[in-house]
Amino acid sequence: MISTTELNNIVSRLIDSGIDLGERILAALVIFVVGRFLIKWLNRLFARILQKRKVEPSVQTFLKSMVNILLVVLLILAVIGKLGIELTGFAALLASAGVAIGMALSGNLQNFAGGLIILLFRPYKVGDYIEASTGAAGTVQEIQIFHTVLVTADNRVVYAPNGAMSGAVVTNYSNKDTRRVDFTISVEYGEDFKRVESVLRSIIAADSRILTTPAPFIELGALADSSVNITMRVWVNAADYWGVFFSMNQQVYSTFNQEGISFPYPQLTVHQG
């Protein structure tokens, strides 16, 4: 039989252990709450430092993402340590599971390496409009540790893995200040090419967005089955590409109708014996 004294000692030890555990849990909660506040403050401070030093926006997003992850890891270790869990034993547990974790995170490690390659060789940066052979296309919003964040023309957000992006064929539409706009304009057989060319050059001259250097190019491109195809190429500032593309089609259509220049219809000539 357990004596009253022994029972009191057991209860006393349980109470002391409960109080100690409660104190450690409370302290861990305080560390977690304060740590989250400090992480947000440090992230904002780090972001201001990067902006003040005028660091490339692509590098900023990458570094901010990496620093945030490191701070969160440190906070988790601090909470675990305050709860009384031996970090050495915790580290040994992680080490024993290292192979499995490495296999599970192999894709993310590849994405991390891909992010470093993107920042080093800079095939694109924040603000560029790109199209990758992976199918991803849009304006680069962020280059994070593992992903490149794109915003499509219809305002969808795409998270493209950095590993795939670093090895993909990437077309960067914003890398150069100017772009060439190509048109194929079809007219009926019998139309005077010189007259059509003169009308096209007057349309070009009326649009101030079209650059004079390099000079606009207009030539007879092909004699197709039902039409004479005229190739027209003009150079514009990259920001004006789509505006010129759409407005030029509208101007050509309305001006040709006013000038009596006919657009072709598919035709088939049948010879009867």
Image (cartoon, rainbow, N blue to C red):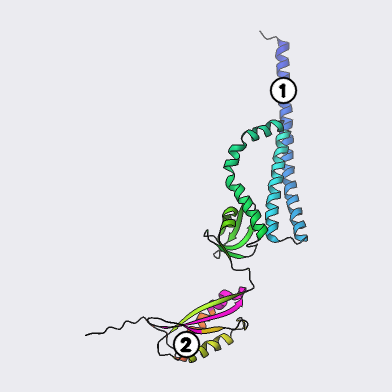
Q: Is residue 21 above or below residue 160?
A: above
- Residue at x 78% of width, y 60% of height: 52
From the image, tell me which residue sits under label 1.
15
- Residue at x 62% of width, y 53% of height: 114
Q: CA distance from mark 2 to mark 1?
A: 95 Å
Q: Based on the displayed image, in which of its 4 quarters is residue 71 positioned? A: top right
Which amino acid, by three-letter code, is at mark 2? Phe
From the image, tell me which residue sits under label 2.
256
Q: Nearer the viewer, residue 259 or 92?
A: 92
- Residue at x 63% of width, y 60% of height: 141
Magenta segment, which residues?
Answer: 219-246
Q: Is residue 3 above or below residue 154?
A: above
Quadrant for the C terminus, please.
bottom left
Other residues around mark 1 within 10 Å, as few (<14) / some (14–19) / many (≥20): few
Which amino acid, by three-letter code, is at mark 1? Ile
- Residue at x 52% of width, y 90% of height: 198
Other residues around mark 2 within 10 Å, as few (<14) / some (14–19) / many (≥20): some
Q: Based on the displayed image, in which of its 4 quarters is residue 55 positioned? A: bottom right
Q: Nearer the viewer, residue 110 or 127?
A: 110
Mark sitting earlier along the chain (2/1): 1
Magenta-colored stretch includes residue 50: no
Residue 143 visible, this orientation: no
Instruction: Assign a secondary structure to mark 1.
Output: helix
Q: Percent from the top left, x then y, of residue 112?
A: 63, 50
Instruction: Assign a secondary structure to mark 2.
Output: helix
